[in-house]
């Protein structure tokens, strides 16, 4: 199994960067804009993709926080769906992953 201290450190660095990015996105989206209505319309149009990026960033933050919690409670590396061990290769690629490859490929019932 991977060195949990290194995994924790890597996840924490990712989390810190994502929190900074989320804050920057929120600041841009909360900016009241320009008094020029045409410029405001353009800014609002530009904000739509930024809002999507913000949503994805918040999702990544949640996933990393959950992974850190699993490290703390000793369940990191165990599939939250079936309880089996997640392949080391998968964990190396995606340290915040919570579901094994078998469960991710299973059709939902």
Image (cartoon, rainbow, N blue to C red):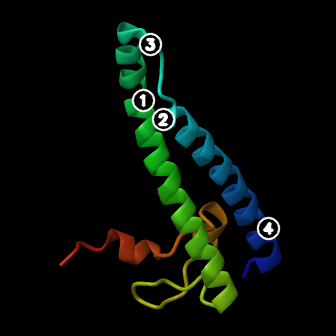
Q: Is residue 3 visible?
A: no
Taking the spot 48% from the left edge, 35% from the top edge, the residue there is 29
Q: Quadrant of residue 88?
A: bottom right
Residue highlighted by disc 3: 35
Residue highlighted by disc 4: 9
Taking the spot 75% from the left edge, 72% from the top edge, the residue there is 8
Q: Nearer the viewer, residue 94 or 48?
A: 48
Quarter of the picture containing the N terminus is bottom right
Q: Residue furthest front?
A: 35
- Image-based side of 94 in relation to 48, left or right: right
Q: Quadrant of residue 61?
A: bottom right
Badges 2 and 4: C-beta atoms under 8 Å apart?
Answer: no
Which comes before the other along the chain, label 1 or label 4? 4
Distance Cα–Cα, label 1 vs label 2: 6 Å
Q: Nearer the viewer, mark 3 or mark 2?
A: 3
Badges 4 and 3: C-beta atoms under 8 Å apart?
Answer: no
Q: Nearer the viewer, residue 25 or 73?
A: 25
Mark 3 burial class by Cα count in 10 Å: few <14, some 14-19, many 20+: few
Q: Nearer the viewer, residue 15 or 46?
A: 46
Q: Quadrant of residue 97?
A: bottom right
Distance Cα–Cα, label 4 vs label 3: 45 Å
Residue highlighted by disc 1: 47
Q: Secondary structure at mark 2?
A: helix
Mark 4 burial class by Cα count in 10 Å: few <14, some 14-19, many 20+: few
Distance Cα–Cα, label 1 vs label 4: 32 Å
Residue highlighted by disc 2: 29
Which comes before the other along the chain, label 3 or label 1? 3
Q: Nearer the viewer, mark 4 or mark 3?
A: 3
Mark 1 burial class by Cα count in 10 Å: few <14, some 14-19, many 20+: some
Badges 1 and 2: C-beta atoms under 8 Å apart?
Answer: yes
Q: Nearer the viewer, mark 3 or mark 1?
A: 3
Q: Secondary structure at mark 3?
A: loop
């Amino acid at each position: 199994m991977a060195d949990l201290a290194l995994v924790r450190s890597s996840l924490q660095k990712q989390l810190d960067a994502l929190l900074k990015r989320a804050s920057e996105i929120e600041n841009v989206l909360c900016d009241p804009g320009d008094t020029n209505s045409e410029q405001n319309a353009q800014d609002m149009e530009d904000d739509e993709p930024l809002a999507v990026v913000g949503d994805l960033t918040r999702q990544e933050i949640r996933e990393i926080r959950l992974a850190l919690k699993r490290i703390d409670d000793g369940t990191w590396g165990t599939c939250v769906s079936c309880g089996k061990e997640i392949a080391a290769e998968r964990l190396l690629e995606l340290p915040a992953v919570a579901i094994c490859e078998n469960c991710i490929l299973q059709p939902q019932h």
